[in-house]
Amino acid sequence: MAEVLVYVDHADGAVRKPTLELLTLARRLGEPVAVALGAGAAATAGVLAEHGAARVLTHEAAEYADYLVVPKVDALQAAAAQVSPVAVLVPSSAEGKEIAARLALRLGSGVITDAVDLQASEAGPVATQSVFAAAYTTRSRVSRGTPVITVKPNSVAVEAAPAAGAVEALSVTFSAQATGTKVTGRTPRESTGRPELTEAAIVVSGGRGVGGAESFAVIEALADSLGAAVGASRAAVDAGWYPHTSQVGQTGKSVSPQLYIASGISGAIQHRAGMQTSKTIVAVNKDAEAPIFDLVDYGVVGDLFDVVPQLTEEINTRKD
């Protein structure tokens, strides 16, 4: 059976959810072979095997933490030479897209970014993308060489599929460019206790209609009742009501959760571009003519300060 390389996104051996989604998609194309790099790489094997990895290629070296993406590209290039895969799948983060672009250049092939679905075909993997602010859906495939494809988080439900998960050491020779850019310091991001915005299955966002920074407590309360991440529109972020790291939109982060709740957000095209591929969209807005209502699955015309607290209370009551 053809093999598919899957780049493992992990933190000291804790595998992040987008990697498990990649393994689910990889099984449509062939037999998944995971590539885990850096500290804790070997510890990922158990979870990867539970989700379909037939083999886990590991390599631990200080270079993966001390330098930027080139050491990881070197390792994936070595893995591709060893496996001869039909495709290489990478999570669609900022780092993942840089890794994918560099790897495709080295392999003399093509790269497809931000795929939301993958299907096998006789001519090679076909990737579905949502493009031009989600106004169009395209299907593409790489016509030469080994396709390198990045996939957006929450594009597919994670499915367990136990496999051997045999751990094998990957031999990597780092290139001269690998140590060209050194990481000189790190500042841990303050934890909110909520899911990472781009990986969350549920996102609750607030916009201009929230009215101020202190009023975002209403949005946070709903998010916490659902175990969701908190997002914000550009208007709310520019006003200083919520951190820029939480901005959803064309100039912010793109999300594709199972459920997206927009409160007090008018639905400008800039915002829609960052959340339009969400599976189910709910909007609360007191303006019945707000553009967001053209997009939603469920819409509530009303004051968010009346609607959202009632929703939060009902959810908490049902949980209890």
Image: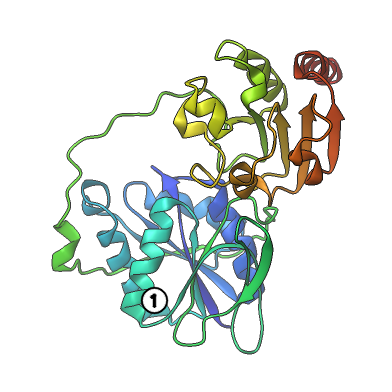
Q: Nearer the viewer, residue 112 or 319?
A: 112
Q: Nearer the viewer, residue 144 or 53?
A: 144
User: What kind of residue is marked 1?
Assistant: Ala
Tell me if mark 1 has few (under 14), some (14-19) or many (20+) residues whose alpha carbon lies within 10 angstroms of its own: many
Q: Quadrant of the N terminus?
A: bottom right
Identified at 65% across, 19% down, the residue is 210
Q: Position of residue 120 (x, y in %)?
A: 66, 79
Residue 134 horizontal side relative to residue 149, left or right: right
Check the image and report above or below for 1 versus 235.
Answer: below
Residue 203 horizontal side relative to residue 89, left or right: right
Image coloring type:
rainbow
Residue 196 horizontal side relative to residue 189, left or right: right
Residue 53 horizontal side relative to residue 204, left or right: left
Image mark count: 1
Identified at 62% across, 25% down, the residue is 208
In the displayed orientation, state which residue is furthest to the top: 214
Secondary structure under badge 1? helix
In the figure, residue 107 lies in which quadrant? bottom left
Q: Position of residue 245 (x, y in %)?
A: 46, 33
Identified at 67% across, 30% down, the residue is 204
Identified at 64% across, 50% down, the residue is 154
Q: Position of residue 119 (x, y in %)?
A: 67, 74
Check the image and report above or below for 56 versus 87.
Answer: above
Q: Position of residue 50 (x, y in %)?
A: 61, 55
Which residue is disc 1 drawn over? 80
Q: Quadrant of the C terminus?
A: top right
